[in-house]
Structure formats: C-alpha cells, structure tokens
Image (tube, helix red, strand yellow):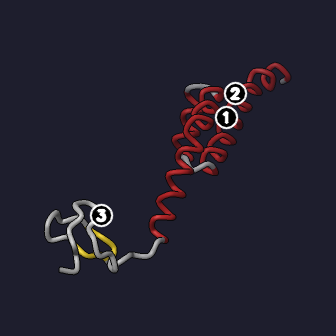
Amino acid sequence: MTSMVSTHLPILLWILVSFLFGFIGEERGLKYWKTFLISLFLTPIVGYIYIHKNGTKQQIVKQTNQNIKKKKHVPTWKCPECGEENPRGTHICSSCGNDLMA
C-alpha cells in the first residue's frame, strides 16, 4: 500500500502543479488549457518559463486593446491632397501641410 502511494505521489504532484500553472497563466492573460498542457507534457518548469516570458506581454496587449476600445471616436477631416485623416478643427494637414479650410 505504501509503495503504491509513493509511486503515484510524484505523478499527482506533477498534475496538480500543472493545474496550478494553468490558473496562474490564465490570470496573466494566457489561455488556461495551453498553459496547462505545456506544463503537463513539457514539465512544470517549462510551464513556469512560458508563463514568465509570455504572461506579462499578453496582459499588456490585452490592456492596450481594451484601452483602444474605450477611447472615443474623434471626428476627422480627410485631406483633399494626400487623403490623410486629420482631427476636425485642424486647419493644416499634418502630413502634407495643405490648408484644409480652403
């Protein structure tokens, strides 16, 4: 009985740590199952490295995309010369210097 527990304990710990890394990866903006499977099949050490290297990048990208969605749309004028979009109220094109009020 004790030999059976001692042989299965490392495998159970491996799986539990993989689940834990899946949750940590999801908290940092990574996909749960991808992080879990990397930890399970490529060792939890590789899973930790994956979370450490990619987790913060994904979170920054996610935050940036959310910030872009929150920004209000600014009405623009289209320059007749170069076609550049300029905010309304601008009198000179920021790209070519054309007078937009003419």
Spot occupied by residue 39 in the image (x, y as percentages of width and height): 60, 32
Q: Is residue 82 above or below residue 31?
A: below
Q: Which residue is mark 3?
A: 94
Seen in the image, is 82 located left or right of residue 89? left
Q: Earlier in the sequence, mark 3 or mark 1?
A: 1
Residue name at image x 30 percent, y 70 percent: 86
Q: Is residue 98 above or below residue 5?
A: below
User: Of 1 and 44, which appears nearest the observer?
Assistant: 44
* Quarter of the image where the C terminus is located: bottom left
Seen in the image, is 79 located left or right of residue 58? left
User: Of 73 and 13, which appears nearest the observer?
Assistant: 73
Residue name at image x 16 percent, y 63 percent: 82
What amino acid is labelled 1 in the image?
Answer: Ile
Q: Is residue 52 above or below residue 75?
A: above
Residue name at image x 80 percent, y 26 percent: 5
Does any portion of residue 31 appear in the rendered image? no
Q: Mark 3: few, some, or many residues within 10 Å (few <14, many ≥20)?
A: some
Numbered mark located on residue 11 in the image: 2
Foreground: disc 3 or disc 2? 3
* SS type, badge 2: helix
Disc 1 and disc 2 in contact, CB within 8 angstroms:
yes
User: Of 97 and 15, which appears nearest the observer?
Assistant: 97
* Quarter of the image where the N terminus is located: top right
Seen in the image, is 64 located left or right of residue 80? right
Q: Which residue is mark 1?
A: 15
Gap in Å between the C-alphas at discs 3 and 1? 57 Å
* SS type, badge 3: loop
Q: Earlier in the sequence, mark 3 or mark 2?
A: 2
